[in-house]
Amino acid sequence: MRGAFRAAWAEVVAVSPRAGRLDLEVRFPDGQAAAAVAYPRLTGAVAAGDRVLLNVTAGDLGLGSGGRHFVLWVDGRPPEAEPGPGHIVKWRYTPWQRAFLHVEEEGAPGHPLLREANDLAGSVVAALSLHSQLLPFALGFTREAGRLGRPLALAYVHTDGGSLPVAWSDTVAKLKAEGLIARVLSVGHAFGGDDECVALPSALLAARLVHGADAVAVGMGPGIVGTGTRLGHTGTEQAWSLQVAAALGGRPLAALRLSGADRRERHFGLSHHALAALSDLAPPSSLVAWPAGRSVAGEPLRRAEAAWRSSPAARRHLSVLVDLDGDWAWLAARAEGWRTMGRGVRDDPLAFAAGAAAGVLGARLAAGGPGLSTTDAS
């Protein structure tokens, strides 16, 4: 039945190691070849010639896994792991539950600093709308930090609103390898960051107090879930991120989900995901970055601005214009190969610009620079 859980056996033909995962080529008994993924932290080692049990549900449904299946089990070799120092369990009360050392728990280096911590002391917390905004955000942040002559450290908090394994994100691996992200913290049932964290508030505090981050980008991994309803989507977590940042004395900054190429009416211009979260759920007086300049001007941006002006969000938050013209060629060149909803920067420059504008503004705020010197877009 379509939609039901389904598993199938296959033989591993080839293995390509990635950061935190193994990309596999597998062959089913009928000779059909397919791509699969194994997370060694869950399955143990996987090698060519192994017979593996695959979860093929996402492939059956045609979901955004890129057609890949996921290894559940290696035949004849149950996964075993050496006991670690952690005792807090993720994926609780499921067959996959296991303990990880969390940055907050007793015995962890971060525990003394976090025991009574509850103040971000004005640190910038940027709430992303999509995981694909992380790359343009980091590029904009890095570019502006260099212009200001300030070596600013950016941390990324990976929530469990999308993919649970951090290793599923090629973006995170790329940004860490290039030094654009200093630390990754995975929250809730997400796993695989440099630090595991019980909850978002303590993750933000750990990024600042334990690791000295100048700014934090918060967002789910790849795989946002939507239903076509106003609030039935995982993008609502953006409001929670802004709320926590404000409650802890941080500077909440929202990255808008904009698009000039999405064929779905609800996501063209200004996505209804971001608009609903900021209108209905986010704390008042959050900063909202708007891209500006000739490089992004056009009907999609005008339509997005009109939707914003007619919404409650425009009266609740402070919109800041960020002119990207002076940096556009550099940013676009660095983003070659980037994709959001299957589109590249040349296909949907407005989507890229939204994340980059938030990154530029985030760096200005983190450096104590002219973050609010531009005109209010609302």
Image: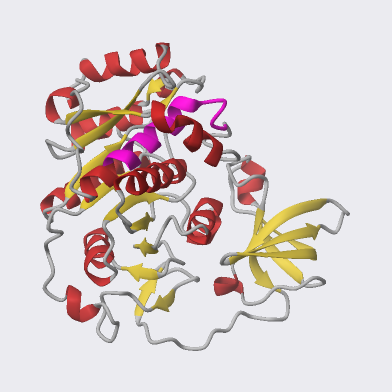
Is residue 291 visible from the viewing direction of this image?
yes
Q: Quadrant of residue 111?
A: bottom left
Q: Residue at x 47, y 37 (%)?
A: 331
The structure's colour scheme is secondary structure
Q: Position of residue 158 (x, y in %)?
A: 39, 56
Total marks placed: 0
Q: Quadrant of the C terminus?
A: top left
Q: Main secondary structure of the magenta part?
A: helix
Let me know if residue 253 is in the magenta part. Answer: no
Is 337 positioned to the left or the right of 372 in the image? right
Q: Is residue 319 above or below residue 143?
A: above
Is 243 positioned to the left or the right of 152 in the image? left
Which residue is situated farthest in the top direction here? 299
Q: In this view of the protein, which residue sits in the foreground, 315 or 190?
A: 315
Q: Residue at x 53, y 41 (%)?
A: 334
Q: Position of residue 370 (x, y in %)?
A: 19, 38
Is 245 positioned to the left or the right of 298 in the image? left
Looking at the rendering, the stretch of residues picked out in magenta corresponds to 344-361
Q: Quadrant of the N terminus?
A: top right
Q: In this view of the protein, which residue sits in the foreground, 220 or 194?
A: 194
Q: In this view of the protein, which residue sits in the foreground, 325 or 353?
A: 325
Q: Is residue 279 above or below residue 12?
A: above
Q: Quadrant of residue 259?
A: top left
Q: Position of residue 351 (x, y in %)?
A: 44, 30
Q: Is residue 291 above or below residue 214?
A: above
Is residue 230 visible from the viewing direction of this image?
no
Q: Position of residue 109 (x, y in %)?
A: 28, 82
